[in-house]
Image (cartoon, rainbow, N blue to C red):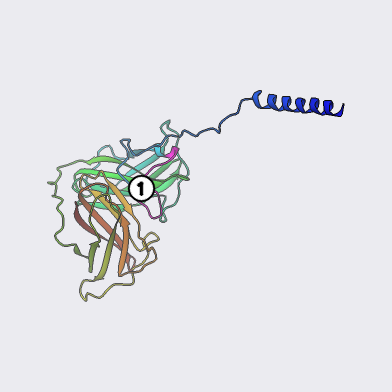
Amino acid sequence: MKRILFTTMLAAVLLVAGCGQSGGKTEEPAMNHGDSHGSSNSESSGQHEGHGDNSGSEEGVTSNAQALFSYSNDSVKPNEDFVVKIRIQAPDGEPYDAFETVHEKKMHLIIVSKDLSYFSHIHPDYEGGGQFSITTSLPAAGEYKWIADFKLEGGSALNRSEWMTVQGNAPALKPIEPDEQLVKTVDGKQVTLSIDHLMANMELSLKFQIADAGTKEPISNLQPYLGAVGHVVVLSEDAEQYLHVHPTEELSSGPDASFMTTFPHSGVYKIWGQFQQDGKVFTVPFVVKVP
């Protein structure tokens, strides 16, 4: 009798267990099929490379950020002050309003002439509502490219650009020719640039050595410029490939300042190194041909 009762109970348990397995649907974990947004829209210009950032990519929803440039003067003329406003917004027109501070600024604005003979690195004020503003002027007629360099909160580094024209008779474009020697004298400083292995698509070191142009003595009292020993901006000769590079040792005071970067393609590039001594920023340009 006990054996019959035990067998009956065991069968009931097995029946209930079988119903529990087949009566419901087992769901796989949900997959997040997010889009991978690149820098392919017309407002983007090449790459941005920041110290410690995964800056070759624009990940997440913030990668579709747009920049709208507007100017206070309908017709901008040489050496005439005007206001440029830059509004950072989503494709639906809603402004982005949370920006990270990168090297002491919410936005770095790079301005270059078409032949790269003119270079300016300025910092617009943030007015709120996604809008930045600054008053500036340009020295001659011709085409100029504005590159707005910024980082949205929680996103990766971005840059957005636009060409504009200063009215008047533009001077002839200067050829962008590689330097035979990477030694320049600027504001009483002799600056030597050395590159460990100049090649496209390979990480390399840019090393600036700074000395007094008269005495040739190494300069070791550089002051921090925007929180670092220096900054380097690189543009391809057509101004389409853009790199903003920060030093590997930010607290260095000279005479050496080293940077790591990667040239994305072969071709001619212009490099601007920016440093500060005695409260004055000096900019040193070099042109190289990347094989």
Tell me, yes or no, if residue 283 can be seen here. yes
Characterize the magenta stretch by its predominant secondary structure.
Answer: loop
Would residue 58 be counted in the magenta stretch?
A: yes
Q: Which residues are magenta?
A: 49-62
Residue nearer the viewer, 32 or 64 = 32
Above or below, 119 against 57 in this view is below
Q: Residues within 10 Å of mark 1 (few under 14, many from 20)?
A: some
Would residue 84 be counted in the magenta stretch?
A: no
Q: What residue is shown at x 54% (from left), y 32% (from top)?
A: 30
For mark 1, what is the residue? 134
Q: Is residue 14 left or right of residue 134?
A: right
Above or below, 207 against 141 in this view is below
Q: What residue is shown at x 25% (from left), y 40% (from top)?
A: 164
Tell me, yes or no, if residue 137 can be seen here. no
Residue nearer the viewer, 166 or 52 = 52
Q: What residue is shown at x 47% (from left), y 42% (from top)?
A: 97
Q: Position of residue 15 (x, y in %)?
A: 72, 24
Extreme-right residue of the structure? 1
Secondary structure found at label 1: strand
Above or below, 281 against 268 in this view is below
